[in-house]
Amino acid sequence: MVYIRKIPLSVLLILAGLLIALVGCSSESSDTTPASTSAEDDSEKDEPTASQEAEEEDSIVIEHAFGETVLEEKPDRVATIQWGNHDTALALGVVPVGFSAANYGVTDENGLLPWTAEKVEELGEDDPNVFQDTDGLDFEAISDSNPDVILAAYSGITQEDYEILSDIAPVVAYPESPWTTSWRDQITMNAKGMGMEEEGEQLVQETEDLINEKASEYPGMEGKKVVWANFSADDLSEFHVYTPADSRGSFLTEELGMEYPESVKELIEDDSGFSLSISAENADVLNDADLIIGYGDESLQEAVQADPRLGQVPAIERGSVAFIGDGTVLAASGTPSALSIPYTIDDYLELIGDAISNIEE
């Protein structure tokens, strides 16, 4: 029940008079007081407190293709998925609580590439938790690793994958488009997601210094026109080219000083696309290439040279081709990572140097 207390009429009249007087005073005051007062009050309310600023300073914010990921503190348990992201963590001295097995290249019984296995052993881990996700992400295994963050700066995850993963832990996705993250961005984004941004920048600098030192031994690479093209002996009616957006292509251009021919770049309709298919009837788009790099062996090179259309491409005809055998350690290093670069750069540059030596000056 609600009780209502009656107020005498005389009291109401007194209150009404006081109210009128106050309104009048307020009106006069408003004529002489700056109008910014309320705005200043609102501004003061909007200003963050010292504790809020501290919280914001401690937060880690990573922007990526699906928005942004915010970590309130440096994560203790780091998981990684898909290609090479674990190499960043390992290079920074952290063994992930779970990471994806390599789905290509020469691997050990755990599905680890040589440079990964070497670093895992160096860090004292004899039983790494490896996800077998060649047929799709193993969300259950990822969840069971109980991560504080999931690193996927170089990956091909979809919006749906991202949402499912985000229910497990905050996710560091790729910056713009799938499978096009450079080795630099892979390191810097993943390192930031680990709360190790400065260490990541230092790792990038050390890797750049190594590349520059090694590349200086092959001055003939500078300015050469190169195409990463893959052929199949079973079907030479078309071939596939990795674009400069792909990390394999960008390593050749950005790190080794080579260039993609304009004839190939003109065919790229989507700058974010990492590959394109070209009919062998249009093989002449490769005519301006000084050097062709791809996956294959001697038998494939012989088949390509014998093809009536592909064999007329100058680089193929003269043998300025660097084919990387599928069953070699070098094969998986075409997509560079923090660990694969120092492990294979000598062999990679030697292969390229041999192909360049066949160019007729």
Image: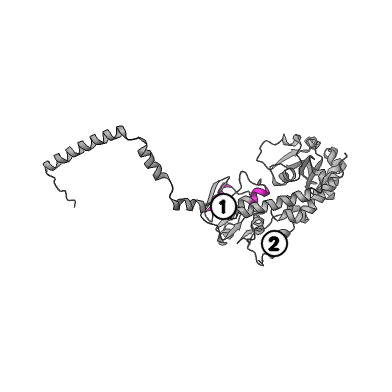
Question: Is 104 one of the magenta-colored residues?
Answer: no
Measure how far apart labels 1 and 2 are at the Cα level.
24 Å
- Could you say which is closer to the camera, residue 173 or residue 53? 53
- 179 drawn magenta: yes
The residue that mark 1 highlights is 171
Please name the residue shown 79% across and 48% down the image: 216
Helix, strand, or loop for circle 1?
Answer: strand
Does 104 sit above or below residue 261? below
Kind of residue sitting beneath label 2: Lys
Rendered image quadrant of residue 7: top left
Q: Would you identify the image quadrant in which residue 360 lies?
A: top right
Residue at 64% x, 48% y is 185
Position in image of residue 138 (x %, y %): 60, 57
Q: Position of residue 42 (x, y in %)?
A: 38, 42
User: Residue 183, image x and y in percent?
Assistant: 68, 49
Q: Which residue is mark 2?
A: 119
Horizontal relation, residue 24 to residue 37: left or right: left
Q: Residues within 10 Å of mark 2 (few under 14, many from 20)?
A: some
- Element type at mark 2: helix
Instruction: Classify 335 as above or below 270.
Output: below
Specify the amino acid type for callout 1. Val
The residue under the point 37% across, 36% down is 36
Q: Residue at x 65, y 64 (%)?
A: 128
Q: Is residue 136 visible?
A: no
Dot label at residue 214: none
Write the start and end of the magenta stretch as one range.
Answer: 158-187
State which tag comes first along the sequence, 1 or 2. Answer: 2
